[in-house]
Amino acid sequence: MKKKAMIMAALAAAFIILHITPSLALRTQVFIMGYPKAAIYSGIIEDTYHNEVDQEKFAELNAKAYTLTRPPIEEATQGELRNYLVKKVGFLYFAEYYGEL
């Protein structure tokens, strides 16, 4: 029982650590999407265009748009997976692909 509790605590701690900052949440999402190299080596910058255009929408969502400087290339469409939306929920951040809107 003690071993099971330790494993659960370690998994919870890892989840919190991977979602404690916007950049870590974004890198975690890109890694989970199947692009570990891009998750590690790509730079992350704020997407000023989407943050200005969708300012009201993002304020309601408590979110910000970010762009990868070296984005992964999706094999099926050969499109760059460049823009992501990072939402803050409590003290944790969660990222999702935002697209080329």
Image: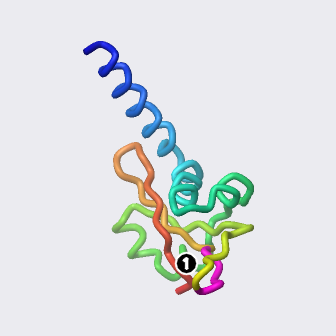
Residue in front for this viewpoint, 48 or 5:
5
Q: Residue at horizontal 63%, vertical 65%?
A: 46
Query: Based on the displayed image, in which of its 4 quarters is residue 2 positioned?
Result: top left
Pinpoint residue 97: horizontal percent, then vertical percent: 50, 70
Q: Quadrant of the N terminus?
A: top left
**Which range is magenta?**
77-81
**Residue for point 42% across, 59% down:** 87
Which residue corresponds to mark 1? 50
Crowdedness of circle 1 by 10 Å Cα count: few (<14), some, many (20+)? some
User: Dot 1 lies on which element?
Assistant: helix
Q: Is residue 16 left or right of residue 35?
A: left
Q: Quadrant of residue 59?
A: bottom left
Q: What percent of the width, then of the height, locates residue 37?
A: 70, 57
Examine the structure image and report whether residue 3 is included in the region drawn in magenta. Answer: no
Q: Is residue 11 left or right of residue 40?
A: left
Q: Position of residue 90 (x, y in %)?
A: 35, 46
- The part of the image, by quadrant, that contains residue 67 is bottom right
Answer with left or right where residue 59 lies relative to residue 71.
left
Amino acid under label 1? Answer: His
Q: Is residue 58 left or right of residue 18?
A: left
